[in-house]
């Protein structure tokens, strides 16, 4: 076991023991697909050390929020900070349970081995968009936070009409975020704007670079205990685990950026 895994396992053991829950439990997690790369590594450590089981379902953050609004059974929900605060305000998430997990920045995905465009400044980014054969991003209608921001960014840059003929919207379900960039990998689309954490796990593509700082959008992802939870103590232990300083190494390695605790 690697040093990081030992530390993570120790953290979970201490957390669970301190939580006063002696019996194993099964919890259900509903999470934004942007967390799949990190959670796929963190959940096995949590389960092995705690003895509890965590099953997880992914989807666009907006779709996950909608499921919780409709009282879909879950113990833990992980979406954007603004979305989870709205859920708490509606009584769907326990207000005192909300914890920031990490931040997600946006970047440009290109086919693996393809030339990487210059996006070092806003002007360079605009030139890249104008020169591109085709540009993809998530359809805002799916509830994607990256898609919603990208659409507003293109409008803010006053490029909507210029880019309209070459824009391609991705409408995949979002439960398999690694498939979001499949048309880039196949060469059907030249490049795609999306979350760096999803680019990191997508086969056949690579990160050309993050958006310029002046137009970057970092979404804070937060976790909370669903009001429908039947195992709130274990759900709380799980949230403390994935937001811990020890888990930060896995989050960073899968493309996340650090954010303030709350």
Image (cartoon, rainbow, N blue to C red):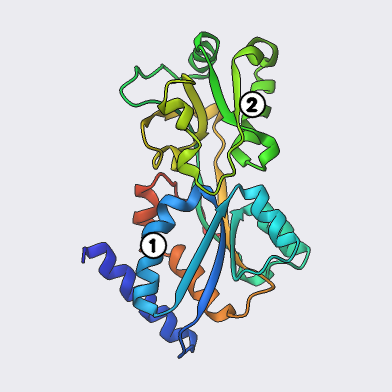
Residue neighbourhood size for the residue with mark 1, other residues' Cα within 10 Å, grouped as few (<14), some (14–19), many (≥20): many
Q: Quadrant of the N terminus?
A: bottom left
For the image shown, how many numbered marks are present on the structure? 2
The kind of secondary structure element at disc 2 is helix
Residue neighbourhood size for the residue with mark 2, other residues' Cα within 10 Å, grouped as few (<14), some (14–19), many (≥20): some
Residue at horizontal 68 percent and vertical 22 percent from the top: 156
Vertical comparison of 240 with 24: above or below: above
* Relative side of 25 to 47, left or right: right
Q: Of the residues tagged 2 and 1, which is closer to the observer?
A: 1
* Relative side of 216 to 144, left or right: left
Q: Position of residue 63 (x, y in %)?
A: 67, 50
Q: Residue furthest right?
A: 90
Q: Quadrant of the C terminus?
A: bottom right
Q: Which mark is residue 20?
A: none
Residue at horizontal 69 percent and vertical 65 percent from the top: 72
Q: Nearer the viewer, residue 236 or 218?
A: 236
Q: Position of residue 110 (x, y in %)?
A: 41, 25
* Relative side of 94 to 55, left or right: right
Q: CA distance from mark 2 to mark 1?
A: 33 Å
Q: Earlier in the sequence, mark 2 or mark 1?
A: 1
- The residue at which mark 2 appears reads as 153
Q: Position of residue 175 (x, y in %)?
A: 54, 49
Residue at horizontal 48 percent and vertical 52 percent from the top: 35
Q: Position of residue 184 (x, y in %)?
A: 45, 26
Circles 2 and 1: CB atoms closer than 8 Å: no
Residue at horizontal 67 percent and vertical 35 percent from the top: 140
The kind of secondary structure element at disc 1 is helix
* Quarter of the image where one finds residue 70: bottom right
- The residue at which mark 1 appears reads as 42
Q: Nearer the viewer, residue 249 or 261?
A: 249
């Amino acid at each position: 076991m690697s040093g990081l895994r030992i530390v993570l396992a120790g953290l979970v053991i201490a957390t669970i023991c301190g939580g006063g829950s002696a019996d194993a439990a099964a919890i259900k997690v509903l999470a934004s697909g942007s967390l799949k790369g990190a959670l796929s590594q963190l959940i096995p450590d949590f389960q092995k050390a705690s003895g509890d089981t965590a099953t997880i379902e992914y989807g666009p953050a907006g779709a996950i929020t909608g499921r919780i609004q409709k009282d879909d059974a879950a113990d833990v929900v992980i979406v954007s900070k603004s979305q989870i605060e709205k859920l708490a305000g509606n009584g769907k998430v326990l207000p005192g349970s909300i914890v920031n997990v990490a931040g997600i920045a946006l970047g440009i995905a290109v086919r693996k081995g393809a030339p990487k465009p210059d996006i070092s400044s806003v002007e360079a980014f605009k030139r890249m968009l104008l020169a591109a054969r085709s540009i993809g991003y998530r359809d805002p209608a799916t509830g994607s936070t990256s898609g919603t921001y990208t659409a507003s960014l293109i409008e803010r840059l006053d490029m909507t009409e210029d880019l309209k003929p070459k824009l391609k919207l991705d409408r995949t379900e979002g439960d398999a975020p690694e498939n979001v960039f499949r048309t880039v990998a196949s060469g059907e689309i030249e490049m795609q704007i999306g979350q760096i954490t999803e680019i990191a796990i997508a086969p056949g593509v690579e990160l050309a670079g993050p958006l310029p700082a002046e137009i970057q959008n970092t979404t804070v992802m937060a976790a909370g205990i669903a009001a429908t939870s039947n195992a709130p103590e274990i759900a709380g232990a799980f949230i403390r685990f994935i937001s811990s300083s020890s888990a930060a190494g896995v989050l960073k390695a899968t493309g996340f950026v650090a954010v303030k605790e709350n």
